[in-house]
Amino acid sequence: MADSDIPHPSPGLLPDAIHAAVRPGTALLRLETTRSRQGVLDGAWWPRTRDVAREVPALVSALVEHLGPVSRVGLDAGAWNAIPTRLVVDDQIVHLDSFPVGDGTVLITRGDRDHFALMVVPPDTEPDAARAAMARAVQADNVTQAAEILVAALPSPMTEPQGPA
């Protein structure tokens, strides 16, 4: 069978099975061992709500399966409701840090210095826009920051219709 006979997903789209499965509460990861992760996202997460106590434990549990123990989670203070200083997840204490960065990411720390950056898709994002943003974030050649991906993928808010003048 020639390579042209093999179906390939369109650029920027996830394979059909993954695309259909991505819904709020999903985390997509592209884990690579590199010396430097500057400017590169390691995955994307689409939480259901902005409630840290409800959302972060499920994310950490999913990550532990692939990364091993997670010691810290750094969250954008402006994107979450009431960030505690720590949570107990699967009988392990996970320390939470909050930063007023506004960049649409969550930072995961494994050990002392091993960091993973995940783009956070806002909970109320339309499914197709969320999937497109997540697909771009996990592309191996992506060097675009999370905030830029989200601005490009998410539709602009509708403007109020103007009444008769």
Image (cartoon, helix red, strand yellow):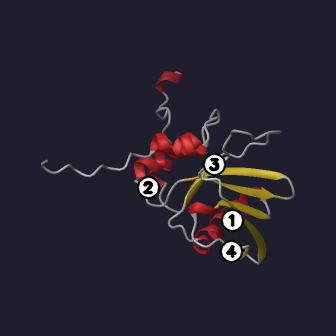
**Do tag 1 and tag 3 residues touch (Cβ < 8 Å)?**
no
- Above or below, 47 relative to 157: below
**Do tag 2 and tag 1 residues touch (Cβ < 8 Å)?**
no
**Do tag 2 and tag 4 residues touch (Cβ < 8 Å)?**
no
**Do tag 3 and tag 4 residues touch (Cβ < 8 Å)?**
no
Q: Residue furthest right?
A: 112
Which residue is nearer to you in this view: 156 or 15?
Answer: 156
Residue 162 located left or right of residue 15: left
Of discs 1 and 4, which sits in the foreground?
4
**Do tag 2 and tag 3 residues touch (Cβ < 8 Å)?**
no
Disc 2 to disc 4, C-alpha distance:
25 Å
Quarter location, residue 143: top right
Q: Please name the residue shown 80% across and 58% down the image.
A: 110
Q: Amino acid at mark 1?
A: Val
Disc 3 to disc 4, C-alpha distance:
24 Å
Q: Amino acid at mark 2?
A: Thr
Q: Which residue in the structure is indicated by mark 4?
A: 84
N-term-proximal mark, 1 vs 3: 3
Secondary structure, mark 2, is loop
N-term-proximal mark, 2 vs 1: 1
Horizontal and vertical percent position of residue 17:
48, 48
Q: Amino acid at mark 4?
A: Pro
CA neighbours of label 4 inside 10 A, class few (<14), some (14 to 19), many (20+): few
Which residue is nearer to you in this view: 88 or 3?
Answer: 88
Of discs 2 and 3, which sits in the foreground?
2
Q: Which residue in the structure is indicated by mark 3?
A: 43
